Image (cartoon, rainbow, N blue to C red):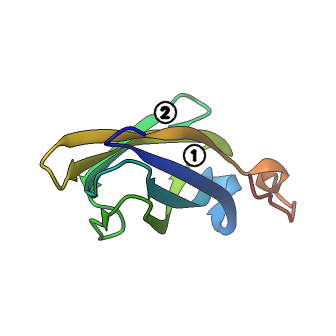
Amino acid sequence: MPKYQFSCDVLPHYLPEQSSPEDEVFGFAYTVTITNTGEVAAQLISRHWIISDSRGHTEEVKGLGVVGHQPLLKPGESFQYSSGSRLRTPTGTMHGSYFFVAEDGERFEAAIPMFVLDAGDAAAPGSSGGRVLH
């Protein structure tokens, strides 16, 4: 088992009530579970997201912590939070990284694997459904 390692699982879903397809606004929520799969406790210090829509427009978001927290996770512990993003197109992707400092002072990053934001058929004006991606 690597000494410094975290896994990130993400479950995104479309928010039709926070979207306006006719105005090119598509709202999405996502729930992230971060788990310390390493051997040393470490604190999440900052995040870096790269958000891209299907037209190639890309935004970078950097900031301290996640939803106002900088959790310290011991080996085997997890932290879960929910957040959101808006796109100008009904589909796009997100990926990035978290920056950690371990209890022994080691600094490292953990990758956030790419995931898809997809409004599905709900993006069409007059449609009523959405779908949850698993």
The residue lying toward the viewer, choosing from 69 and 51, is: 69
Q: Is residue 130 above or below residue 99?
A: below
- Earlier sequence position, callout 1 versus callout 2: 2
Query: Considering the image in quadrants, where does the N terminus appear?
Result: top left
Lateral position of residue 33 relative to residue 14, left or right:
left
Lateral position of residue 27 relative to residue 124, left or right:
left
Under mark 2, the amino acid is His
Q: Position of residue 81 (x, y in %)?
A: 47, 68
Q: Mark 1, residues whose alpha carbon is within 10 Å: few (<14), some, or many (≥20)?
A: some
Q: Position of residue 31 (x, y in %)?
A: 56, 62
CA separation, marks 1 and 2? 9 Å
Q: Give SS at disc 2.
A: loop
Q: Position of residue 116 (x, y in %)?
A: 64, 42
Under mark 1, the amino acid is Arg
Q: Quadrant of residue 108?
A: top left
Please identify the residue farthest to the left as the structure is shown.
Answer: 105
The residue at which mark 2 appears reads as 57
Q: Is residue 111 above or below residue 84?
A: above
Lateral position of residue 59 relative to residue 70, left or right:
right
Q: Give SS at disc 1.
A: loop
**Which label sits on residue 88?**
1
Q: Residue at horizontal 85%, vertical 63%?
A: 129
Lateral position of residue 102 relative to residue 39, left or right:
left
Asked if residue 10 shows in the view, the reply is yes
Do the residues under discs 1 and 2 have CB atoms within 8 angstroms? yes
